[in-house]
Image (cartoon, rainbow, N blue to C red):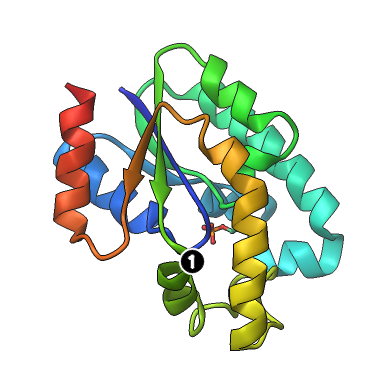
């Protein structure tokens, strides 16, 4: 199977992706990690040294490369991947691919991201108050892309196991 998980930063894409892949005996790949390995730099280093536009081009290139080279996978995207360079159309039009939008509320995302923003260049400099405002606006803009996924799963306070089970039911 070809499975893609997408959603905002902090929605649990990597954690859930790893668990899901494990359960269904598929290879798991995190697109951010794939990019870091290919570029030989961390995501913050790429943003700092080369800028966001370079990152978005690289993200597009490596997404296509990954999809062309792999037949069976669970792939977690970066939070912004679906929203740039026609990537969501690439996902939607890719043969046999099933995508899941992991939807989390603004308070859930804020709670998860407040102490965990240093590895995320887009959030690194925001205070708590600014973070809520930023997530609200950003999520609103991005939802248009996220909503194009094959399925939407609400995450919030659900256990990881329950989310994985929900995804597996939709895969049958
Ligand atoms: C980004 C999300 C990050 C990473 C980069 C940009 C975004 O991935 O790709 O920092 O634009 O939302 P995660 O969603 O895995 O944090």
Position of the N terminus by quadrant: top left
Name of the residue lying farthest toward the top: 95
Q: Quadrant of ligand 1?
A: bottom right
Q: Is residue 101 above or below residue 114?
A: above
Is residue 47 visible in the rendered image? The answer is yes
Position of the C terminus by quadrant: top left
Q: Secondary structure at mark 1?
A: helix
On whether ligand 1 comes within 8 Å of the CB at mark 1, the answer is no
Return the residue nearer the eye: 109 or 98.
109
In the image, what residue occupies the spot 44% across and 72% down? 107
In the image, what residue occupies the spot 39% across and 48% down? 102
In the image, what residue occupies the spot 72% across and 68% down? 45
Query: Residue 97 at what x, y percent from top left?
Result: 42, 21
Return the residue nearer the eye: 64 or 100.
100
Query: Residue 141 at what x, y percent from top left?
Result: 67, 49
Q: Quadrant of residue 85?
A: top right
Query: Residue 132 at what x, y percent from top left?
Result: 59, 75
Q: Is residue 78 above or below residue 108?
A: above
Is residue 42 visible in the rendered image? The answer is no
In the image, what residue occupies the spot 47% across and 31% down? 149
Left or right, 149 with respect to 122, comes to left
Q: Is residue 51 above or below residue 147?
A: below
Left or right, 121 with respect to 10, comes to right
Please rate how many residues cluster around mark 1, counting C-alpha atoms within 10 Å: few if below 14, some from 14 to 19, many from 20: some
Query: Residue 90 at what x, y percent from top left?
Result: 61, 23
Name the residue beneath numbered marker 1: 106
The tally of labels here is: 1
Q: Is residue 144 above or below residue 93?
A: below
Q: Quadrant of residue 157?
A: bottom left
């Amino acid at each position: 199977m070809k499975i893609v998980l997408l959603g905002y930063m902090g929605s649990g894409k990597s954690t859930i992706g790893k668990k899901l892949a494990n359960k269904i005996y598929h290879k798991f790949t995190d697109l951010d990690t794939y990019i870091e390995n290919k570029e030989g730099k961390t995501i913050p280093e790429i943003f700092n040294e080369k800028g966001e536009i370079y990152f978005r081009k690289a993200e597009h290139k490596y997404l296509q490369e990954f999809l062309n080279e792999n037949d069976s996978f669970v792939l977690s995207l970066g939070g912004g991947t679906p929203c740039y360079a026609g990537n969501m159309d690439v996902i939607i039009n890719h043969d046999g691919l099933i995508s899941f939008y992991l939807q989390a509320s603004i308070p859930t995302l804020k709670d998860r991201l407040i102490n965990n923003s240093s590895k995320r260049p887009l959030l690194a400099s925001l205070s708590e108050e600014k973070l809520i405002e930023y997530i609200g606006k950003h999520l609103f803009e991005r939802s248009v892309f996220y909503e194009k996924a094959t399925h939407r799963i609400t995450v919030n306070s659900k256990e990881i196991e329950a989310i994985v089970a929900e995804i597996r039911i939709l895969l049958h």
